[in-house]
Amino acid sequence: MTSPLINRRDLAFVLYDLLDVGAFTQQARYADHSRETFEAAIETAHRLALEKFHPHNAKADKNEPTFDGNTVSMIPEVAEALAAFRDAGFFAPTKDYELGGMQLPLTVAQACNAMFQSANIGSAGYPFLTVGAANLIESFGSQEQKSLYMAPMLAGRFFGTMCLSEPQAGSSLADIRTRAEPQPDGSYRVIGNKMWISGGDHELSENIVHMVLAKIPGGPPGVKGISLFIVPKRTVNPDGSVGERNDVRLAGLNHKMGYRGTTNTVLNFGEKGGAVGYLLGQPHRGLEYMFQMMNEARIGVGQGAVMLAYAAYLFSLEYARGRPQGRAPDSKDPASPMIPIVEHADVKRMLLHQKWVSEGGLHLCLYAASLVDRIAMAGDAAQKARLELLLDTLTPIVKGWLSEVCLKSNEHAVQILGGYGYTRDYPVEQYYRDQRLNPIHEGTDGIQAIDLLGRKMAIKGGAGWNAVKAEIARAIAIAEAHDELRPMARDLAGLVETVEATRATLLGAMGKGQASLALANAFHFLDLFGLLVMGWMWLWQASAVRDLPPPATAEERAFRAGKLAACRYFFTYEVPRSAYLASMLVRLDDTMLSMRSEWFA
Amino acid sequence: MKVLVAVKRVIDYNVKIRVKADKTGVETANVKMSMNPFDEIAVEEAIRMKEKGKATEVIAFSAGPAQCQETIRTALAMGADRGVHVLSDAELQPLAVAKLMKAVVDKEQPGLVIVGKQAIDDDSNQTGQMLAALLGWSQGTFANKLEIGEGVAVKREVDGGLENVMLKLPAVITTDLRLNEPRYASLPNIMKAKKKPIEQLTSEALGVDVAPRLKTLKVEEPPTRKAGIKVKTVAELVEKLKNEAGVI
């Protein structure tokens, strides 16, 4: 083990053996690239993460940012890390050479991001939001908006945020009250309060570009009346220089359980008459635009969850190998030396669980990123549409299901360290607290479940589900060729049929006006679907291991044996849960729906 | 003024070194390799000189197997202009490297050569000094600070403090740890580095005899540290230091 951040062999396996990113270099856009340039970028990311982000992870947690009424203060290491991150070009890895980018495929850029997420999720939050906000302006902004706001964001001079929620409207965006009043000069005055804004204030950058959802008075009601505005913390002059403070005030910082390195804020827009804002794209299409950033963010949150699980897995594994405790149950000699706890089957249970979550999760997240790349590279519209449906359908699993299983995975890491794991002297308790955010932000897991069952399973006559099924069928056919994988391939085929039948029953109920009943158990459907997707990933990994040329070293043999063992664990201990989930789902059980508020207590 | 920097490909500093079973050396097969950290400092210093207008061109030199090109490529991605690689699969000892570098210096005529004070694999701490002797140039070793003017002012890390010396140019500098903090190879520069030229030479073409002058008898792991003991009193400690350890 040479890195506490990630298993580099595993990462290379995912990128080159599973996702074949080497083949991307046949595209004109990536013609200058090769495995060497990809690896050089990943190496830079790994070193920077290890040397500049990892060392202050615990310190940033113990010293959360403070606000004195005027200025936000935080430990200086955050700014130093982000300056090094900026100088190395990580604000624009996927962008054109002309924009200061490296023209990396998103899959490789996400592999780089994984290092920072593993090293220090709090400090990694700022660039994550900035890149997402810059992408929004790139997609929907005017030339002027691109040069005034996007360019300095890609250069790491301005940071960005996404301002959706309000104190009274979190998951329910139709009910936002922030309004934007048109001005004679074409700009708007934005007035309202925003809640839970990560990176909403700090002194890390010259400026902060808020992407704000607001309603233009007189527009349609509900989500159809929401528009998207660029509201800078400081105004930007036509020559690009930074001007006066805009009417955006920090009302206060939220004091969080984890993720403490990222400021989380309550922002007041327009205390003194209105913050100057600029409409992005067309009026009333703001939510549609923001979904681009939200979908990117959801994949990013899923990967952040995976990397917190991964870092904790690697730490608890090292600990388990070095901590002697007890003897094997069949050892009769009390004077014999104690064995490291990694030798105890119950500790292996918790390590195997963490292994399938971390490594399978990394595979799924980078697969999602590779779909974004393949959508961009798609030759024809039909292919592109199919890949988009595939990605849309998997997104709730990437964000919602992974953040659930990753939290459980972090719990195992704490458990392996026992009492030590529960103290602040070891990092696993911080990873656990940091992880606890992921089931909440960017659409709670409950929202993800309803999105999966209510929308993704139904859209275009089930075309998204069909796209997933086709991919899984291909993976099953490949696995069938290996004798030892055939039983698992058949289990997965059975699981596809189970999901098919469950989906049909639930959508049938929805079609008959029983939406509340069908969606009451959406969370369990998310769980069922997650098992299917993760089973697919692990069968894919096992097949790929079997197709590799003979191993050259003992380490490589161990790596491959570990992959097959994790796959076996998943199919033995996790896949069978699908039977009880499905039986409950197809009964359209109404235990939860029929429960009444007054009966609880 | 051209600046020549040497970059050595060594086992990555994070890797736990393992001695080969036959004790002829350390295991390098399937081991992660990277640039000697002291050489990164040399590259950084040369690039900063170029950024300040004190140097016109930075040339990265390496000697060894074909994979040394990767190490040169890293120097190019940090900001060096071009590379010179002396291809050799033989064992290269410091004297051989110094002779190869001298041949390249004769060809390129740099005004300054910067090398790491030592490599983290063999810790020889010889190449820079040997090269200065072969060239008959002044040398500033263990540099903590450099300033280029008429000559080059070097602050050296020596036992017990810092020593300031002024050298005439041309000169050979060896870098110490605190000279600078090397930059990361930035993403756009990784792409630019692909297009920068690396000239490949051989010891034969340069007319240098690289045959080892020293013979390695055996490589072994250092002995594992023995467990310590707790003493009850200061007097007992002093007694043990005097009589058992023999250090006072």
Image: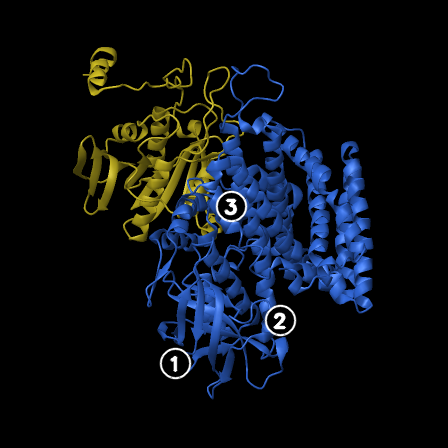
Chain colours: A blue, B yellow
Q: Residue furthest bottom?
A: A184
The percent coordinates of residue A225 (x first, y second) are: 60, 79
The percent coordinates of residue A445 (x first, y second) are: 62, 57
Q: Give the amino acid at mark 1.
A: Lys
Disc 2 versus disc 1: nearer the observer: 1
Q: What residue is shown with label 2?
A: A288
Q: Is residue B215 above or below residue A584?
A: above
Q: What residue is shown with label 3?
A: A42
Distance of label 3 from label 1 (alpha carbons): 47 Å
- Badge 2 or badge 3: first in the primary sequence: 3
Q: Which residue corresponds to the image point at 25% horizontal and 11% vertical from the top-left?
A: B244
Do the residues indicated by labels 2 and 1 lie within the same chain of the protein?
yes
Q: What residue is shown with label 1?
A: A272
Q: Which chain carries label 1?
A: A
SS under mark 1: loop
Q: Which residue corresponds to the image point at 17% horizontal and 36% vertical from the top-left?
A: B163
